[in-house]
């Protein structure tokens, strides 16, 4: 598998509050997942973020990562989704 084969797309949506990026980044760092690109904005009080991450050195599988992010999302009132880059591209092609 090429290096690009380990990239994931993580999306985060919810009410804005302090510490969202820190909380998500901490989970990724603990799993040895590198953030390649991040874009976030606040629209009328709603926080939205999309991240492209490299999971080739990850210490957890995607199911475990999803569980940890989902748990943090519930704690912070966020919806967090994780998809393999290929799935994301397939779902969003025109």
Image (tube, rainbow, N blue to C red):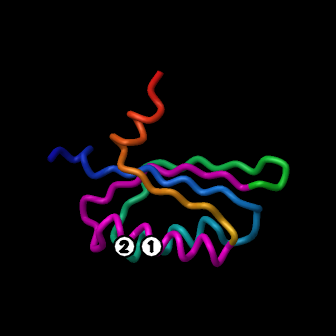
Q: Position of residue 27 (x, y in %)?
A: 46, 73
For residue 84, above or below residue 73? above
Q: As drawn, which residue projects farthest toward the top?
A: 94
Q: Which residue is mark 1?
A: 67
Q: Is residue 1 left or right of residue 9?
A: left
Q: Residues within 10 Å of mark 1 (few under 14, many from 20)?
A: few
Q: Is residue 6 left or right of residue 71?
A: left
Write down the quadrant of residue 12 in the picture: bottom right
Q: Secondary structure at mark 2?
A: helix
Q: Position of residue 91 (x, y in %)?
A: 44, 35
Q: Determine the residue positioned at 50% across, 51% down.
A: 51
Q: Position of residue 46 (x, y in %)?
A: 77, 54
Q: Nearer the viewer, residue 11 or 54?
A: 11
Q: Determine the residue positioned at 66% across, 56% down.
A: 13
Q: For the image shown, how many numbered marks are present on the structure?
A: 2
Q: Residues within 10 Å of mark 2 (few under 14, many from 20)?
A: few
Q: Which residues lie in the magenta part?
A: 47-76
Mark 1 and mark 2 residues within 8 Å of each other at the beta carbon: yes
Q: Secondary structure at mark 1?
A: helix
Residue 40: in magenta span? no
How far separated are the C-alphas under marks 1 and 2?
A: 5 Å
Write down the quadrant of residue 14 in the picture: bottom right
Q: Which residue is mark 2?
A: 64
Q: Determine the residue positioned at 40% across, 69% down.
A: 65
């Amino acid at each position: 598998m090429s290096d690009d084969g380990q990239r994931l797309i993580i999306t985060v949506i919810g009410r804005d509050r302090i510490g969202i990026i820190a909380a998500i980044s901490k989970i990724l760092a603990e799993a040895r997942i590198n953030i390649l690109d991040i874009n976030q904005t606040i629209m009328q009080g709603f926080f939205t973020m999309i991240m492209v991450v490299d999971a080739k050195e990850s210490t957890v599988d995607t199911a475990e990562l999803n569980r940890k992010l989902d748990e943090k999302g519930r704690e912070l009132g966020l919806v967090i989704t994780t998809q393999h880059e290929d799935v994301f591209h397939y779902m969003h092609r025109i």
